[in-house]
Amino acid sequence: MNGRTTAEYETVRVSADAAGTVALGRCLADLLGPGDTVLLQGPLGSGKTTLAQGIAEGLGASAATSPTFVLIQEYRGGRLPVYHIDLYRIESEVEAWALGLTDYFYGDGVCLVEWPERAPALMPDDAVVIQIEFLDGEGRRLTFRATGPRSAEILRSFDERC
């Protein structure tokens, strides 16, 4: 995110319910590789953790839960390690920096970051950014945006497969 505002690629999906959001996450997971980062944005209760659960399931990791109180959950045992990071309780980028986020971002697994806007300067330049918005009832609009060449490649494949 590091000040980058133009998208390299963008696509939109509508999910009717939580099961649809999980299914989108599972499909996206098939396209992710080591070092990929997914930034999840949206208001409280919009489905960020639900989407993260779908991605983790798609990668074969154990069931993901909201990491709000522990900040970072690591899930292993699947195709790739999953690092589920929740910055909601972070009050400054210095506090986020102390978590050692760059070790996760450039490591061997996939990073899922909820509330990345709490530490935008620390986010990788090339990431899949997913903005989740409420629709009527249980529905959600998910806007998938790539901020670099790797994430654009992921989303082009996502458009073909999901």
Image (cartoon, grey):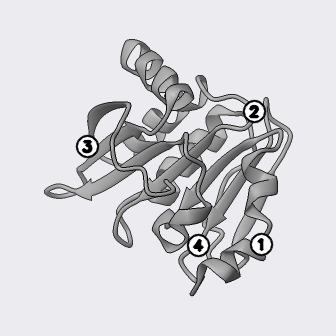
The amino acid type found where label 1 is placed reads Leu
The span from disc 2 to disc 3 (Cα, nearest Å) is 30 Å
Residue 62 appears in view: no
Query: Earlier along the polypeptide chain: callout 2 or callout 4?
Result: 2
Q: Name which residue type carries label 4.
A: Leu
Tell me which amino acid carries mark 3: Ala
State the residue at coordinates (40%, 43%).
21
Closer to the chain start, of discs 1 and 4, is: 4
> Which label sits in the foreground, 1 or 4?
1
Measured Cα–Cα span from mark 4 to mark 3: 27 Å
Q: Which mark is residue 87?
A: 4
Write the residue at 38% across / 69% down.
Answer: 45
Residue 99: assigned label: 1
Q: Amino acid at mark 2?
A: Pro
Q: Which mark is residue 23?
A: none
Q: Left of 69 or right of it: where is 102?
A: right
Q: Earlier in the sequence, mark 3 or mark 1?
A: 3
Residue indicated by mark 3 = 16
Q: Which residue is mark 2?
A: 34
